[in-house]
Amino acid sequence: MSKPVALLITGDFHTNSKVSLCPADGAALDDGDFYIPNAAQKDLYQFWIDQFLPWVKACSRGHRLIFDHGGDGIDGAGHHGSLQTFGTDDDAENLHVEMLEPLINMVDEIIYMRGS
């Protein structure tokens, strides 16, 4: 008998936005600079690590976990402007993968939509 399915739907991470999920210790940028997250980003990261990921793991125990990312994974100057973002599109992509990796390692299947 197959496992029941748990479906986790998220979206609008807007990685590289100055209000997005970012490691508490910051992020290296491809130009050699280093981004230091603000207090809200540090709080969001702690919630992600200490609360959200363990909650997903607990709720999906015994289930086949499907992760549906609903778009707007990264942000950039073309989306909101350079005052609301940091780094390059490559920085955004690398950071987005880094932030999602713990979640991706838990799931059985990923549905990833792009765009707005």
Image (tube, rainbow, N blue to C red):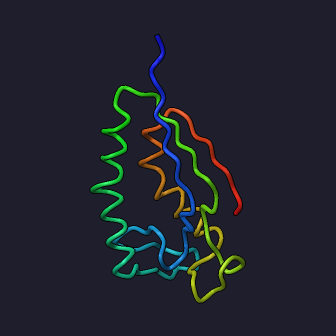
Relative placement, left or right, of 61 versus 76 is left
Does residue 63 appear to the left or right of 79 in the view shown?
left
Residue 25: x and y in percent read 34, 72
Which corner quadrant of the image does residue 73 belong to? bottom right
Residue 14 in the image: state x and y as whole percent.
Answer: 57, 68
The answer to which of 31 and 102 lies nearer the viewer is 102
Residue 60 in the image: state x and y as whole percent: 38, 35
Name the residue: 72% across, 78% down. 78
Residue that appears at 71% across and 60% down: 115
Left or right relative to 81: residue 101: left
Q: Residue at x 47, y 50 (%)?
A: 101
Q: Residue furthest bottom?
A: 83
Where 2 sits versus 89, above or below?
above
The foreground one among 93 and 44 is 44
- Residue 54 higher or lower than 24, as above or below: above
Q: Quadrant of the C terminus?
A: bottom right
Who's the residue at 63% across and 75% down the image? 88
Q: Position of residue 77 (x, y in %)?
A: 67, 80
Q: Is residue 22 left or right of residue 32?
A: left
The residue nearer to you, when weighing 86 against 45, is 45
Query: Which residue appears farthest toward the top when viewing the image?
Result: 1
Count up the numbered dots: 0
